Image (tube, helix red, strand yellow):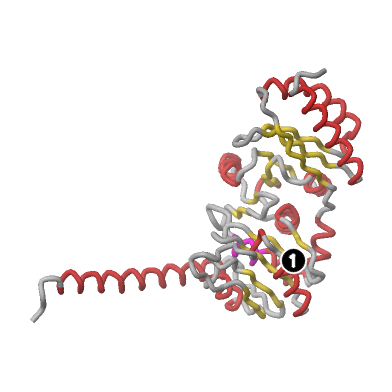
Amino acid sequence: MRGPDDASTAGLGAGADDAGALRESTLADYVDHVVGSLDGRNLSGLSVVLDCANGAATDLAPAVFERLGASVTVMHAAPDGRNINAGCGSTHMDDVRAAVVASGADLGLALDGDADRVLAVDATGAIVDGDQIIAMLALDRFSRGALPGDTVVVTVMSNLGLRLAMADAGIAVVETPVGDRHCLAALELHGLVLGGEQSGHVILRDLATTGDGTLSGVHLADVMARTGTSLADLARNAMTRLPQVLLNVEVHAERSVVMDAIADEVAVQQAILGNTGRILVRPSGTEPLVRVMVEAPDADVASSVAAHLAEVIVTVASGGN
């Protein structure tokens, strides 16, 4: 005879079973979707190291790449509720770099904990960032007539080298504030499909409604497989990253006043750099900082200009001339 709590316990058990079945069905649907996004192509012959960051991609990313025929080595895929992103994933790439070189893999992919970002590693252990991934995907899609509007979306922090490479290829660039949500909004507004951030948020809007590191990694690997070209060569041919220097200057004065006061000097320095360099000075939205970013073909020049502007900001903020 059942006790008074048996009915509710049985109901909970059934609900748990249903939830488990729904989860498995949803995960299977996701894997099918990503695999199907290659329209029957596969990654046979590619060896891939996957760093799952002990996070959301732990089960899914290996399943996708294995289904696609890649030879897969998986690392940091044992989440315990505390170790997500801990010394691993796209924010800590030493392990995946070492594993790629040691195993002779063609490609390494490092996801972050919630799996919306991915950075890559080529066979030499060099890191390939989000700008480079966007550039490679853009050039590939452009060559196949699969880049609507012949345009990509990037943020103000994307490297000038990406902008120059896109201009040389005849691809337009829409620029947004920092944040993948701004990229998505611009993609939707202009009816575009490819955009993202240097940090590895890459949005393929015709295939997903947000950044998806596994999906982005699959399409990067697909370019390698279809062209028979190494990641190092693809990245090198896609764009040249300009040296980028970022300084954070602590400012406790009214930052809008400081920004107005340094505008002329920023313009002078930008004129000196010309079209081959870029300056971005912006106040932090969360901290008492003014961020100075300078890009130039020469690292010493970028550092010198950034340091000069930082000094100007400090002087103005302290009430000097």
Q: Residue 291: which quarter of the image?
A: top right
Identify the residue at the far left of this view: 1
Q: Quadrant of the C terminus?
A: top right
Question: Which residue is more in the foreground, 293 or 61?
Answer: 293
Instruction: Say which amino acid is labelled 1.
Output: Val
Q: Residue at x 87, y 30 (%)?
A: 269
Instruction: Report the number of discs.
Output: 1
Question: For residue 51: magenta?
Answer: no
Q: Is residue 320 above or below residue 3?
A: above
Instruction: Report the residue marked by disc 1.
Output: 121
> Measured from the top left, where is residue 241 in percent x and y?
82, 51
Q: Residue at x 81, y 39 (%)?
A: 294
| Prevailing SS of the magenta stretch | helix
> Measured from the top left, where is residue 44 in percent x and y?
68, 79
> Measured from the top left, where is residue 156 in percent x and y?
70, 40
Question: Which residue is more in the foreground, 208 or 107?
Answer: 107
The span picked out in magenta is 213-219
Q: Residue at x 77, y 27 (%)?
A: 313
Q: Quadrant of the N terminus?
A: bottom left
> Measured from the top left, where is residue 47 in percent x and y?
71, 77
Q: Residue 271: which quarter of the image?
A: top right
Q: Residue at x 10, y 71 (%)?
A: 4
Q: Residue 190: which quarter of the image?
A: top right
Question: Which residue is more in the foreground, 10 or 184?
Answer: 10
Q: Residues within 10 Å of mark 1 (few under 14, many from 20)?
A: many
